[in-house]
Structure formats: C-alpha cells, structure tokens
Amino acid sequence: MITKQELQGMTWIDIVNPTKEDALAIMDEFHINPIVAEELLAPTMRARVDQYNTYLYLILHFPALHHTKGSHQMPAKNQEVDFIIGKKFLITAHYTDIDTILNFSKTLEVYATLQKNLTGDHAGFLFCHLMKYLYGALQAELQFISDALAHVEDRMFDNIEQELVFELSVLSSSLVGCRSVTRPHHEVLASLADIGEHFFGKDFVHHLEALRGEQYRVESMIHGNFDTLSELRATNNALVSTKQHKTMQTLTLMAFITFPLSLVAALFSMNTGYTPIVGSPNGFWYIILLMISMTIGFFAWFKHKKWL
C-alpha cells in the first residue's frame, strides 16, 4: 500500500509491504535504480547506506518492542525500514505497520493543514524528523524497561525471587534484542554523515550530527539498563542462593536430629531375648521421653553452635 504526502514542495512516499507494482511505480516516477527497487520487495538482513547520483539509499532495523502497563512482553520480530532520500523526495518502505511512522504521517498532515514549516529546503530534513520520531519511540520503550527494572528493585526483598527471575529474564531478552538490532546504527549514521555532507551540503552536517546524538542517547539508555539489570540479577541470584542454602541447612539439621531418633527406635524394636525398658509397664513412655530429651538436647546444642 502506497501513501503519498506533499509538503512544502517535497514528496513523501510511504510503502507498507511493497509489491512489484509499487516498486515499478516509484522506479519510473523517481528514476530509482532497478536494483534498489527490487531490494524493496523483501527484507534485508544487513543495515547499510549507499549513494547514487540523485538519492541516498539507507537500510535500518528497529526493535519491535510493544509493552503495556503492568506487563512484560517478549520482543517481536525486528522491523526494517528502507529509506530513499532525494533532494525533493523521501521514500520509506517497511513490511509491517509501524505506529511511529503512522503518527509521523498524521503530524505532517496537521502541519500541512496549518501551513506550518516543519522541514527545510530538501528531503534530508524530512528524513531527520522521521528518524527522531523513530528514536523517540525507541527511547520511550527503553524508559519503560527502566521503569520495569525500578519496579523489580522495589520488590526485590518481598520474598518473590522466583517471580523476579522470570521478569528479569524477559527484560534481559528485550534489551539484548535492542542492542543487537541498533548496534549497526552507529556505523551507518557515521557513513551517512560523511556522504550527507557532499550530497546535501555542509550546512546540513549538524543535523546529521544531532541525529547521531539521538542514536547515542539510545545506546546509552541500553547500556544503563544493562548495568541495572546486571546488578538486580546478581542481587536476586544471591537471595535465591541464600534461601536455598537455608533450606538445605534446615533439611540437613532435621536429618541429623531424626537419624539418632530412628536409631533409638530401631534398637528398641530389635527382636532379642532381652531389651532394656521394653516390656516394662511404662516402657513406651520411657522411650518417648528419651527421644524428646535427645531432640531437645540436639536443638540446644545447635543453638549454642549458632547453626540455627
């Protein structure tokens, strides 16, 4: 599906799940290289930027993180966005609906209606605005993860270690996805800054540097969340280990106490010609009293040794 918008002498074409007919249409209208047009038809694994005579071709991937309040969802499949940036046109192609791009489209419609100036004199400004929207949405998702980590920290000592293990694992999976998908952005935007200086002029360089600043902010948030996650996971693992240690200690002490009692019971149940106490009128109670005395004695000894 193709959506077309005109703004201040520039054209933005947004294509969702491009078809062969869509690729041919933009190839004819904007004189796009057939190889580039064909690449729009299927996702590409590698992020990159290429320069052609009249446009730049850029491929970036973004993590698809969709969270709702009070829930932690596993990251969805990554979203690819292809950009073809000309002097007076911007073409974006992606293979699923992306809410951020839809919101940006609505913003452009409002600005066009109000005749407000959103962009500069070429489509590079339009590209930078769109990228800031995409990075802004990603920063919001990373802030959600940061808030979720803070919520985990608040409940760290509420005796729910097993529940927190699952939550931390889901958050870790989201952060790993963010880091792996956005890592190539640094090199691609650095190359774009070099190419963009020649393509759009030196006056546009600081806009591309500002865009790299947004990318650096995303990268810093990812690293910060990873540091927090690492500390929380280490603390939670220590709590789990401590609880397991206490459980094993209790079971060991119980076994150590009950073993002598079982031995006493076994001795008095031996089928021999004569067994002390057994057979006397109060023999049963004597044996029970002996066991209780031994239990109290062991317990007092453990308390004295500070094993309990």
Image (cartoon, helix red, strand yellow):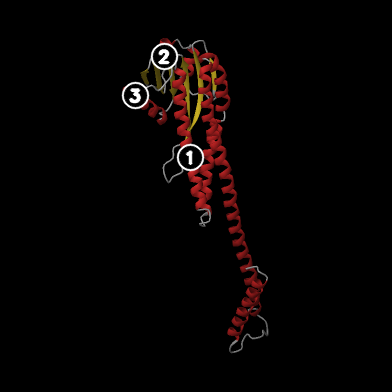
In the image, 112: left or right of 84?
left
Identify the element where label 1 is drawn: helix
Residue type, mark 3 in image: Glu
In the rendered structure, are the residues bearing label 2 and label 1 in contact, judged by CB atoms less than 8 Å apart? no
Which residue is located at x 57 percent, y 38 percent?
Answer: 223
Q: Position of residue 173 (x, y in %)?
A: 53, 40
Which residue is located at x 58 percent, y 42 percent?
Answer: 227
Q: Position of residue 61 (x, y in %)?
A: 50, 28
Quadrant assignment, res 271: bottom right
Q: Position of residue 75 (x, y in %)?
A: 48, 37
Q: Position of residue 113 (x, y in %)?
A: 31, 23
Q: Nearer the viewer, residue 9 or 184?
A: 9
Residue type, mark 1 in image: Gln
Identify the element where label 2 is drawn: helix
Numbered disc in front, either 3 or 2: 3
Residue type, mark 2 in image: Ile
In the rendered structure, are the residues bearing label 1 and label 3 in contact, judged by CB atoms less than 8 Å apart? no
Q: CA distance from mark 3 to mark 2?
A: 22 Å
Q: CA distance from mark 1 to mark 3?
A: 28 Å
Q: Residue furthest front?
A: 203
In the image, 172: left or right of 103?
right
Q: Earlier in the sequence, mark 1 or mark 3?
A: 3
Identify the element where label 3 is drawn: helix
Q: Nearer the viewer, residue 204 or 260?
A: 204
The disc label shown at residue 26, or none: 2
**Does 205 sit above or below residue 132?**
above
Look at mark 1 in the image and give the residue it sits on.
Answer: 143
Look at mark 3 in the image and give the residue it sits on.
Answer: 109
Q: Is residue 259 visible?
A: no
Quadrant assignment, res 103: top left
Density class for disc 3 (Cα within 10 Å; few <14, some 14-19, many ≥20) is some
